[in-house]
Each structure stands twice: as C-alpha cells, then as structure tokens.
Image (cartoon, coloured by chain):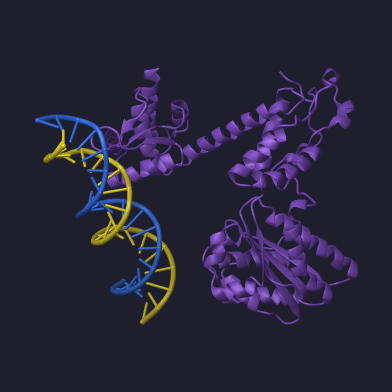
Chain colours: A purple, B yellow, C blue
Amino acid sequence: MKAFGDDDTIFRDMDVLNPNEQTYQPTDLPERTEELDQIHSALRPATMGSTPLNILVYGQTGQGKTVSITLKTNQLQEYADDADMDLTVVHVPCKGMDNSYHALTHLYKEIREKRLGPGEELPSGYQRKALLNMVLEELQEIGGTIIVVLDEIDAIGDDDYILYELPRSNPNGVRLSIIGITNDLQFRENLDADVRSSLGEDEVKFDPYDANQLRNILSRRAEGALRDTHFRDKIRDYEHLESEVLSSDALPLAAALGAQDTGDAREAIRLFFRAARFADDNGETTVTEAHVRAARDFLEQKAVESGIQTLPQQKMLALMSTTWHISKGESSVATTPIYTQYKKMCDVEDIEPLSNRRFRDRLNDLSDSNILTKKRGRGRGKENKYGLAVDVATAVENLPQKNERYGEVAEILRKQVEMGN
DNA sequence: TCTCCACAGGAAATTGGGGGTT
DNA sequence: AACCCCCAATTTCCTGTGGAGA
C-alpha cells in the first residue's frame, strides 16, 4: 500500500486549481477589465456621497460574474472603511430559491446578521408585504449606503415581486442600490419593462471566454498550483530534474476544448485540474496533452453515467427496453420492437404505458442527449433504428438497483446481459 | 415502374394539475 | 368549495415518405 507523504508531486498548491470557488477565488481578472470598469463606474457614485447605480449583470455560467462583483464591492468596502464612509454590502445567493418571498427571507436574515452578527433565523409566517416592510426597516436601521447583490436571480423565475418593489422602495436615509446577477439571458428579456428599466440602470454583459482568454486564465492558475522549474529543488526525485512540469501543448489543448464547449472557465479549470491529477497520481512529472485528453474522456464518461442515473422514469424505461434488444447482439433496433418490449416492462412494473407517438419522442430525446444512436429512414417503409451510444456495460451498470424504482425490470435485464456473455 | 402501407413526425385536441378568484 | 384559467404533458389525428413487392 502507498504511504502518505512519500509521493513526489507536481503540485505546489492544489487548491489554486480546485474548481470549487470556496476553495480558491482569483484576486484579479485581466480578461474582464472592461466589465470591471463598467461595474466601477456604476458603483463610483458611492464615493461621492450619492447612490450607486443599480446594475443588471448577465452572462452564462463560469464567466466570472460573481467574482467580478465580489472583487469590486470588496474594493469599495475597503475604500469606505478607510474614508470612514458608511457602506454595507449584502450578498444573497438565490440559487435554489423558487420565489421572491423565499429570496426576501434570506435577504432579511443576511441584513440582520450584518447588523447583529451571525445566528439569525429565517423569518417565516409573515405576509409578503409585511416581510418587505421588515426588510426596509432593517435597511433604515443600518442606514448609509447599502448595496444588495442578488446572485442568480433567474432562480426565482418569473416572480418579479422583489425586483419590482426593492429598487423603488427608497427607504428613509438609505442610499440603496441593487445588483442583479443572472445566468439566463432569456431572463433579462422576460423581465417586466418597469423592472428592467429600474434594475438595469446599467447593464454589464459577460461574453463567453474565447480560447486565448481561457489559456491565460489556465496558465495563471497553473502557475500558482504547479511547481515550475524554479521549484525543482523541492522535488525529491532528482532523476526527473530535466523534465518540465507542464508540457507546452497541454494547456492550450485544455483551453481549446473548453472554448469549443461552453467558454466556461470553471469547466476548463475542472478539466485541467483532472489532467494534472492524472499525471500526479501516476507519479509522472509532466502534464501532457495525453493527460488532458484522458481527463476529457473521464469527465465525459462521468457525465454520461450521471446522465443515465438521473434519467426520468419514462426515458429510463425507453433506455432499458432498447438495451434489452441491443444486449441480444443487434447493433440497432427498429422502433416497433422497442415499443413492444417497453409495454411488457410497463406491465411488469404495473404502469400505464405511454402512447406509441409519445414513446417515439422519448427515444428521440435519448438520442438527442447522446445516449442512444438514431438511424433514420432505411428498411421497410420509413423506419428509424436506435442503438446504444454508450457501452452496454455502462448502460447496464447505471440502471436502477434492485431496491429502487424499476429495479425489477433492470434486474431481469442484467441477468440477460450476463447470460449473453 | 407503379402502388401500397407502415411508420415518422407535425399539428390539433384533450387531459390534468396548480394557482388564483369569488 | 366551486369555478375558471393557464400551462405543460400527452394523446389523437393526420399527412408525407420511400422502400417493398407486384
């Protein structure tokens, strides 16, 4: 067995590459200078004794929206502390909330904690209007300039209440500014025109990073996280002294793959982190292109597996009935036999089967999410044929267990696959 | 080459659940 | 509670397609 502490490592500080933002937050964002400047301009009135402008920040996930706001508000807070200015910043993550009321309760709690220290309870049982008044009273209690950051406000859906009331409440003796952050571009379009004009006094848009920007971001992270040539003396295994910790093509590849995909920096970092760990776990001293590719395959495989595991019930049955046929050796099967098998499975589980038409949509859904393959046309009349886009083993292993829903059918399927081999 | 027909997939009709109103 | 409205999911209906079989 391996002993801890004996391993050489290419890492200097692994946390810097950890995609989890609680572990590491960058302190400067050269790729977002423009956006930071826009935020700066909107917040600057605070330093002149005026109300900072409301901002609506939007862009896809992993584009540095939250970090930018945090950096800028922290910077303002520092200035305020030095200048003896009365400034309070409240950050409310709305992720997982489903309505304005929910968001208001959290806002109330956060404000109370700013004033009275941690340990406040979430309020409950109040009417919406009453709760809003409580929030406003708390704001007045604090006074001065207050910036409320509503992070991921798209989570609260089309419930505009908080966004409608808060910006126009203007409590006595308070200079109140609202910053809304959203991942959902559609959300901005769907906003009530009034809300949009009051909340979006300034709008800051974060476009997806391109491959160059991702490469810069990754190299900064890599620099902090990996040992470089100057740190070789810290590596105990001197025979590897000649090798570089990072091969020249690994990082650009990770950046290119990331840009191709979504331009999500978090995803790119996750990919590169995994590649570096592969290298490190194998006791290798260089992160190579091969590691990046392996990491990509690994993450894709993980995504497929969790995709199968979290499949909705009907899609799960559709996958199982397809797999049932495929596991008998065919490479692809026509819709009708799959549907027949599906109906049998529904019978076993005592469920009302979907109509043929609907079931075909389910099959197409599965092929859209790259779990099944689809061949159109061919054969008698016009007939689609479906196959598995993943290994039979992968599909079978990730089906429900005995004790879970549809476990019975899955169990039968597993038996058949065993016999087939 | 012609006709037939089983299926694909678009569109209309139906259902059913949640939320609001009286 | 009774009612209506809205929305999404689903079923029902329908047309177009293109190889099979004559």
* Viewport quadrant of the C terminus of chain A: top left
As drawn, A25 above or below A274 = below
Viewer-closest of A315 and A42 = A42
Note whether residue A120 is visible: yes
| Residue A261, position as x, y percentages in the image | 59, 43
Name which residue lies at 78% across and 77% down: A50
Name which residue lies at 39% across and 42% down: A315
Residue A198, picture quadrant: bottom right
Disc count in the image? 0
Q: Is residue B12 left or right of residue A108?
A: left
| Residue A408, position as x, y percentages in the image | 37, 33
* Viewport quadrant of the N terminus of chain A: top right
| Residue A258, position as x, y percentages in the image | 63, 42
Note whether residue A126 is visible: no
Viewer-closest of B17 and A360 = A360
| Residue A295, position as x, y percentages in the image | 63, 32
Viewer-closest of A258 and A325 = A258
Name which residue lies at 86% across and 30% down: A229
